[in-house]
Image (cartoon, helix red, strand yellow):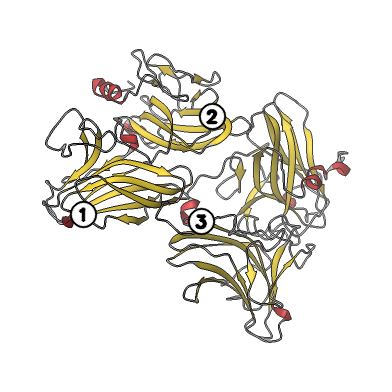
C-alpha cells in the first residue's frame, strides 16, 4: 500500500548514500540509527526489506501523529540537512493530505522551532534541503508525520543526512545532485555529464572536481533547440536561513555568441533578479565566477542558459560553493542591520540632524490622556518633532540615517504617531538621499492616520548608488501645526513583502493571523476576544494594537462581564528545561474601573498555580511592556488571567507575546517588571 512496486524500490536503492553516515543521519537500511519514535505517538515502522521507514492509515487514523526524535546533535559549523521523503494519498482525499514537519529542539528552549513543512503528494521520492546555522548549542531533530484523510494515506522517510556546508553548494557527484532540479523543457535541459557511462551527451573530457573523465558536472547543449530563445534552467534548493557572502562556481562555454548564460535569484513570491551574466565566451578550460550573494529570506539560485538557435554550443557547470565573506572583487561597505536601526532608548544611534535648533528631539514623557509613551516599552524614549515651536510655516526637521551601500534591496520599518494637525497629509515624509548626486526622492508620506496611535510603516527600496534615509516633518501653515513622533526604526536586507511570507518566529505571537497556540479555558462572551481597532466602550481599552497600529490584539470586553469575573488564556504545553526563561508581552490597562491582570505558571500534574506577575487598576493610556523571568524544569503552561473591575471601563488587552530562552538580560526594566507584583500578592476576594 505504501509504495508502488519495484520501480520506487529501485529508485530508493539508487538514492542510497554511503554506509558511514555522519551524526544526525540515517539511511534506514537495518535500523533507525540514532532516531527513536516518541512513545506517546504512533510508531514509525521500518520496512521489512529496509531502505525506508513509514507510517500509514493501517496503523492510525486521520489527524494522528508519528514523531521521530534524534539524539543530541551539534552544528558548530554551518550544516545542511537533507531529507528524502514521500507522501502518498488517494485522489479523493487531496483536500486534506498528510503532512510532514521538521523541527529543531534546542536544549535550553521550551518550544520547538519549525524549520520545514510539506504536504504535497508524490509518486516518487522528493528531496528537502535545510540550512542549519552554526551554533554552539546542542539540539535534536524532531520529525513529525501527521496522517491525512483517506484509506491509503502514508508518509515515508528514505534518508536523513546532515553534512557540514551550505545546501546551495554542489559538486554533482552524488545521485541526488544536492537537491538541484532541472525545469523540464521539451527541447533543452540540463543533464549530468561525465561518469563511467559514456554517451553522446558526455561532452567534456574532464570534470572540474576530480579533473577526471569519471567525475560529474552539469551541462546543457543546443543540439535540440528548435526555437529562438530556448531556455534551460537549473534550480537550487531554497535557502532556509539568512546568508550573505560570495557564491562561486566553475563554467565552460562553447560558441558563446549564440547563447546567454545568466544567474538569477528568485524569492518565494516569484520575483527574479539577475545577479550575474557571462560577459565572454571563455575558453576550453574551466572559468571561475564569483558573485556577491545576499539571501536575507528564502530564495533559489537559478542557472539559466538561453540559446538563439541549434548552433549555440553548450554550457557546463561544476563545483558550486559559498563563503560567508565578500568576494575578492567586492569593495562595497558591509551592511549592518544593527548599525542602521535605532529604538532611541540610549541615544540617536547612527542617526543625526543637519542643523542645530528645534528639529527632532529625543524625549521621554509620562503617558497621559493626550500623549502616549514610546513604542518600545511604553515608558522609554522616542523622537519628537514639535512644529508648534516654529515661527514660520513650511518648517522642516530633517533626520538622516546612516549611509547604506548601493545596489541592495532594503526593507525600512518604523513606527510613528501624529498629534494635532487638522490636515495630516505630508506632515511626515521619508526621502531617499543619494549622496553622490545630492538628489532627494520622496518614497513615502503620511496620508491619513488615527491620531495618537503608534502606526507601523513599511517601505521597500533599492538604489544603485549609496543612499541615506531621511525623515522630514512639515508644518504647512502657521495655523495648522502639531507633533510628529518617531520610534523603533529598523532597516533590513530584502523585500518587506518577502519577509512577511516567513512563518512567525517560534515562541512568538502577534495575534495577526489567529490566536496562535493559545487556548481559552472557556469560550463565551466573557472570555478573551481577538480584535482590531478601538474597543466598543469609550475611555477604556486601546485605540489600536501594539504591533502595527491597525492589527489584532486579545482583550476582555468588560461590558460583557460582571464585577470580579475572570477570563483565562492558556499557552500550549511548554517543555521543562533547566535555566531561565524570559517571557515578554505588551499589556494595555486604561479605564477608571480597570481590574486585575495576572500571569500564572501551572506545572504539569500540579493543581496549584504560581503567580509570576500582576498589575492592578489603570496603568496607562499606552501599551506597556512586561518582562517576566522564571525557571521551570517540568512541562508547564503560562496563563494570562484578566479580572473585570468595578465598571464597564475595565477593558484589558495583551499583544506581542514572546517566549525566549535564557534570562531577560540587558532589558533595563527586568527587575521592575518581574517583581512589580509583590505588593499585590494577596488575592483579591470577589
Is residue 259 found left or right of 456 in the rendered image?
left
Q: Earlier in the sequence, mark 3 or mark 2?
A: 2
Q: Are marks 1 and 2 in contact (CB under 8 Å)?
A: no
Q: Earlier in the sequence, mark 1 or mark 2?
A: 2
Quarter of the image where the C terminus is located = top right
Q: Nearer the viewer, mark 3 or mark 2?
A: 3
In the image: residue 262, left or right of residue 116: left
Query: Callout 2: few (<14), some (14-19), or many (20+) C-alpha neighbours within 10 Å?
Result: some
Q: Residue drawn at (57%, 64%), measured in percent from left and top?
A: 402
Q: Mark 1, mark 2: which one is toward the viewer?
A: 1
Cα separation, mark 1 vs mark 2, equals 44 Å
How much space separates mark 3 and mark 2, taking CA atoms? Answer: 29 Å
Residue identifier under label 2: 74
Circle 3: element type: loop
Cα distance in 3D space between marks 1 and 3? 32 Å
The front one of 532 and 323 is: 323
Residue 510 percent across, percent down from the top left: 61, 49
Residue at image point 69% right, 41% down: 583
User: Residue 281: which disc?
Assistant: 1
Residue under pointer 3: 334
What is the secondary structure assignment of the residue under circle 1? loop
Question: Upstream in the sequence, badge 1 or badge 3?
Answer: 1
**Few, some or many residues within 10 Å of mark 1 (<14, 14–19, 20+):** some
Amino acid at each position: 500500500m505504501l509504495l508502488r512496486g519495484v520501480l520506487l524500490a529501485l529508485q530508493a536503492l539508487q538514492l542510497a548514500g554511503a554506509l558511514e553516515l555522519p551524526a544526525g543521519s540515517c539511511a534506514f537500511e537495518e535500523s533507525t540509527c540514532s532516531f527513536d519514535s516518541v512513545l506517546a505517538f504512533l510508531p514509525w515502522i521500518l520496512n521489512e526489506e529496509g531502505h525506508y521507514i513509514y507510517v500509514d492509515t493501517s496503523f492510525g487514523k486521520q489527524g494522528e501523529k508519528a514523531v521521530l526524535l534524534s539524539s543530541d546533535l551539534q552544528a558548530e559549523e554551518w550544516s545542511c540537512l537533507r531529507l528524502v521523503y514521500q507522501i502518498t494519498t488517494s485522489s479523493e482525499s487531496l483536500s486534506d493530505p498528510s503532512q510532514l514537519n521538521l523541527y529543531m529542539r534546542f536544549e535550553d528552549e521550551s518550544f520547538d522551532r519549525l524549520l520545514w513543512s510539506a504536504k504535497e503528494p508524490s509518486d516518487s521520492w522528493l528531496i528537502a534541503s535545510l540550512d542549519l546555522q552554526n551554533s554552539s548549542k546542542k539540539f535534536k531533530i524532531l520529525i513529525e508525520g501527521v496522517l491525512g484523510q483517506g484509506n491509503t494515506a502514508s508518509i515515508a522517510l528514505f534518508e536523513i543526512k546532515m553534512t557540514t556546508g551550505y545546501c546551495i553548494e554542489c559538486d554533482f557527484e552524488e545521485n541526488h545532485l544536492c537537491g538541484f532540479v532541472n525545469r523540464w523543457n521539451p527541447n533543452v535541459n540540463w543533464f549530468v555529464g561525465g561518469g563511467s557511462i559514456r554517451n553522446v551527451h558526455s561532452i567534456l573530457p574532464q570534470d572540474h572536481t576530480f579533473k577526471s573523465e569519471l567525475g560529474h558536472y552539469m551541462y546543457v547543449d543546443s543540439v535540440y533547440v528548435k526555437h529562438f530563445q530556448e531556455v534551460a534552467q537549473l534550480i537550487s534548493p531554497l535557502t532556509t536561513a539568512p546568508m550573505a557572502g560570495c557564491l562561486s562556481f566553475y563554467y565552460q562555454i562553447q560558441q558563446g555568441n549564440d547563447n546567454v548564460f545568466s544567474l538569477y535569484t528568485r524569492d518565494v513570491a516569484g520575483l527574479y533578479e539577475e545577479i550575474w551574466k557571462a560577459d565572454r565566451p571563455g575558453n576550453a578550460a574551466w572559468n571561475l565566477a564569483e558573485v556577491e550573494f545576499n539571501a536575507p529570506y528564502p530564495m533559489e539560485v537559478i542557472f539559466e542558459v538561453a540559446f538563439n538557435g541549434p548552433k549555440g554550443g553548450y554550457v557546463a557547470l561544476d563545483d558550486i560553493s559559498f563563503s560567508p565573506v565578500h568576494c575578492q572583487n567586492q569593495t562595497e561597505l558591509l551592511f549592518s542591520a544593527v548599525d542602521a536601526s535605532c529604538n532611541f532608548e540610549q541615544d540617536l544611534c547612527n542617526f543625526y540632524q543637519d542643523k542645530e535648533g528645534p528639529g527632532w528631539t529625543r524625549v521621554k514623557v509620562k503617558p497621559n490622556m493626550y500623549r502616549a509613551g514610546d513604542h518600545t516599552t511604553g515608558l522609554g524614549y522616542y523622537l519628537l518633532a514639535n512644529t508648534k515651536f516654529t515661527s514660520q510655516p513650511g518648517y522642516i526637521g530633517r533626520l538622516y540615517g546612516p549611509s547604506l551601500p548601493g545596489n541592495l534591496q532594503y526593507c525600512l520599518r518604523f513606527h510613528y504617531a501624529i498629534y494635532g494637525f487638522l490636515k495630516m497629509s505630508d506632515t511626515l515624509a521619508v526621502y531617499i538621499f543619494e549622496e553622490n548626486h545630492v538628489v532627494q526622492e520622496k518614497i513615502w508620506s503620511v496620508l491619513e492616520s488615527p491620531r495618537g496611535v503608534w502606526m507601523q510603516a513599511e517601505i521597500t527600496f533599492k538604489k544603485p548608488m549609496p543612499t541615506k534615509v531621511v525623515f522630514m516633518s512639515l508644518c504647512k501653515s502657521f495655523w495648522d501645526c502639531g507633533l510628529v513622533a518617531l520610534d523603533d526604526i529598523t532597516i533590513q536586507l530584502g523585500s518587506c513583502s518577502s519577509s512577511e511570507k516567513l512563518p512567525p518566529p517560534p515562541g512568538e505571537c502577534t495575534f495577526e493571523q489567529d490566536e496562535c497556540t493559545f487556548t481559552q479555558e472557556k469560550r463565551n462572551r466573557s472570555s478573551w476576544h481577538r480584535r482590531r481597532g478601538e474597543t466598543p466602550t469609550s475611555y477604556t481599552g486601546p485605540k489600536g494594537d501594539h504591533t502595527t497600529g491597525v492589527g489584532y490584539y486579545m482583550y476582555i470586553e468588560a461590558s460583557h462581564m460582571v464585577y470580579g469575573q475572570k477570563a483565562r488564556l492558556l499557552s500550549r504545553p511548554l517543555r521543562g528545561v533547566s535555566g531561565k526563561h524570559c517571557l515578554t508581552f505588551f499589556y494595555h490597562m486604561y479605564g477608571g474601573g480597570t481590574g486585575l491582570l495576572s500571569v500564572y505558571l501551572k506545572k504539569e500534574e500540579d493543581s496549584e498555580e504560581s503567580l509570576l506577575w500582576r498589575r492592578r487598576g489603570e496603568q496607562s493610556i499606552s501599551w506597556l511592556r512586561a518582562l517576566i523571568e522564571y525557571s521551570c524544569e517540568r512541562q508547564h503552561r503560562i496563563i494570562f488571567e484578566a479580572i473585570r473591575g468595578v465598571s464597564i471601563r475595565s477593558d484589558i488587552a495583551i499583544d506581542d507575546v514572546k517566549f525566549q530562552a535564557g534570562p531577560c538580560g540587558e532589558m533595563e526594566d527586568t527587575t521592575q517588571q518581574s517583581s512589580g507584583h509583590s505588593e499585590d500578592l494577596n488575592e483579591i476576594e470577589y
